[in-house]
Image (tube, helix red, strand yellow):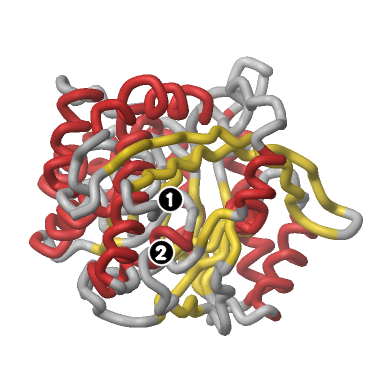
Amino acid sequence: MPTITAVRATPLNLPVTVGSGSRSKSTFLSICIVEVELDDGRTGCGMTAITEEEVVAAIVNEVAGHALVGMDPLRHEQIWDKLFWLLAPRGQSGYASHAIAAIDLALWDLKGQILGQPCWRLLGGARDRVPVYATFGFAFFDRDELAAAARSWVERGFKRLKMTVGHHALQRRDEPRPLADVIREDVERIRAVREAVGPDVQLYIDANCSLDYFHAQDLARRIEDFDISFFEEPVAQNDIPNLAKLRARTRIPLAAGQNEGLASRFRDMLAAQAVDVVQPNACITGGYTQCLKIAGLAAAFNAGFANGGAWPHHNMHLHAGLANGSLVEYHSVAVECCKLVFDGLPEPVEGMLALPEAPGLGFRPNRERVAELAKRPGSRGAGKA
């Protein structure tokens, strides 16, 4: 059997443009790609994001990678457990979960190459297409621009749309930027999008943990008549008691979990009846190895299981593989980042993403482009867009 000879991480701070035409914004989004090389020359590639890419790269290159040399790449349970006790022995999660996720995805990519199967088949092969929702509605759009962008995505065949709300309200409350004003504007922004796309388009909202309970509850109360399909990360820290309290007081389904690192957090959300949909992200929540277990928890609780936090081309394998898999987030900015790095990414058609038949993940990093992108300065904390 082949063995691991090297594990390398490359931090990337990627330039991207949000929006189009006269209303666009240049920004940066960072990712960290991790490659695991075997003694037979094969290489698997994973990634993580929504974190400090320089920190994750240092963890992989200086600590985790050395611990895996000589190990069997197909024994991903053994490797995952070793990485957990090395990087997060007291349940710290955080950067450790990101590093483990990137390594784990690379190992599954290798597993597919060794066995000659795409990852989604190895994960269960429940379906060969997954439904996607397009994340399009960002804070820098004004109401009219937001409505126009929504119509544009519908014209492209998307019937499920997600927009952001809250907009870092707690973080920016001392600018001053009163939370009550943010909520009032969010109501009008949601109204504008709903009126623009009509009643047949599913509309999701995401506060990115930027609200306290009081203002999340106020927003939920004001928008119940707009037929919101789920309200993602409504409260700071995914605070489970506050999520449970909010869920009991709104008709809007609640979703959370894209940035959680431990399966026990999802257990606690489900046991507290705090969410309707759990959203582990394969690129953040410990890779496929841990996300499989979280999906099992969701199935046992008869709860929804979807992708939040972007990176559809990695998460599509998980949701195609499992019978209770469902929605994959087609985050427009994250997708543009992946197009800079990877070749062979499938494109959605009529709101569905078809899975590749090529072994492993089915797409590869473009080494020449990655080498050029790696020359750019790091994000230094500003790579989460």
Read off the residue under disc 1. Answer: 45
The spot of residue 240 in percent (x, y) is: 24, 36
Q: Are marks 2 and 1 in contact (CB under 8 Å)?
A: yes
Residue drawn at x 16%, y 32% is 82
- Residue at the extreme front of the image, as rendered: 40
Q: Between residues 134 and 189, which one lies in front from this camera angle?
A: 134
The spot of residue 83 in percent (x, y) is: 22, 32
In this rendering, is residue 365 above or below 118? above
Badge 1: how crowded within 10 Å, few (<14), some, or many (20+)? many
User: Is 150 displayed left or right of 206 in the figure?
Assistant: right
Q: Is residue 255 visible?
A: no
Read off the residue under disc 2. Answer: 361
Q: Amino acid at mark 1?
A: Cys
Q: CA distance from mark 2 to mark 1?
A: 8 Å
Q: Amino acid at mark 2?
A: Leu
The spot of residue 374 in percent (x, y) is: 65, 35
Residue drawn at x 58%, y 74% is 347
Q: Quadrant of residue 22?
A: bottom right
